[in-house]
Image: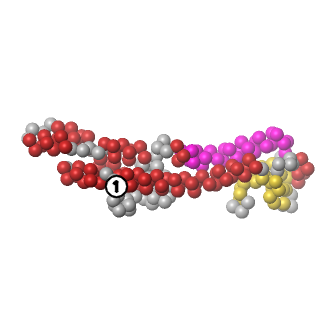
Amino acid sequence: RITYGTANAKDLLALKHSLAYMPKLESSLQMGKTAYITQLSKDFDPLTDIYELLERSIHPEAPFSVREGNLIRDGFHEEVDSLRDIMQNGKQWIVELELRERGSTGLKMKVSYNKVFGYYLEVTNSFKDMVPDYYMRKQTLTNAERYITPELKELEDVILGAEEKLIALEYDLFCEIREHIAGEVLRIQKTAKDI
């Protein structure tokens, strides 16, 4: 499956699990007494580098599908970590923006979200005369106005784009890892034959 590019994360985790036994097997071979076992021990490849790559890279609870995300471990790739951070902390950033805007403008407002308009600042009509120039009107309601600011728009783009980028990036990284391991197939087959 790895060679044909059809292996999923569970397949790579199964390979990693098998490779975890190689150092112990190598130690056992080194205690062998016969000439055959001694020679086998000298030539035995425990595939430690492949095990370490899989241990560092593939998330231990990765799904079967390679297109759902959650394939790559935290700490393996800086951009994956950054996108995960955005997804986890994006709502807190919105709350902080709302508090800053309330403090700097004195407006009674709230930041909300809907699928049609995205994120927006909702200001009641009694405060709309105090709205700063950098607020851009997005929608007029009976009792309020909805606005966007350049900072809120930028946060929205970052937050909403993070999940899509993360899934695509994890898939690309997974494919690179799988291709790297496919390039080591002769070593893997030799170790399997030796076993």
Compared across the picture, whether 23 is left or right of 139 comes to left
- The residue lying at 46 percent from left, 46 percent from top is 73
Residue 81 horizontal/vertical position (percent) = 53, 44
* Residue occupied by mark 1: 182
Residue 83 visible, this angle: yes
Give the quarter of the image for residue 164: bottom right
Which corner quadrant holds the N terminus?
bottom left
- The residue lying at 24 percent from left, 40 percent from top is 24
Residue 112 visible, this angle: no
Nearest to the observer: residue 1 or residue 95:
1
The scheme the figure's colours follow is: secondary structure
- The residue lying at 26 percent from left, 40 percent from top is 23
Residue 79 horizontal/vertical position (percent) = 54, 46
Amino acid carrying mark 1 in the image:
Ala
Compared across the picture, whether 92 is left or right of 30 comes to right
- The residue lying at 84 percent from left, 60 percent from top is 140
**Height in image: 25 above or below 175?**
above
Q: Which residues are magenta?
A: 81-107
Residue 122 horizontal/vertical position (percent) = 80, 53
Magenta part, dominant SS = helix
Residue 84 horizontal/vertical position (percent) = 56, 47
SS at mark 1?
helix
Residue 178, magenta (yes or no): no
Nearest to the observer: residue 124 or residue 174:
174
Q: Label 1: few (<14), some or many (≥20) within 10 Å?
A: some
All told, the count of numbered labels is 1
Residue 87, magenta (yes or no): yes
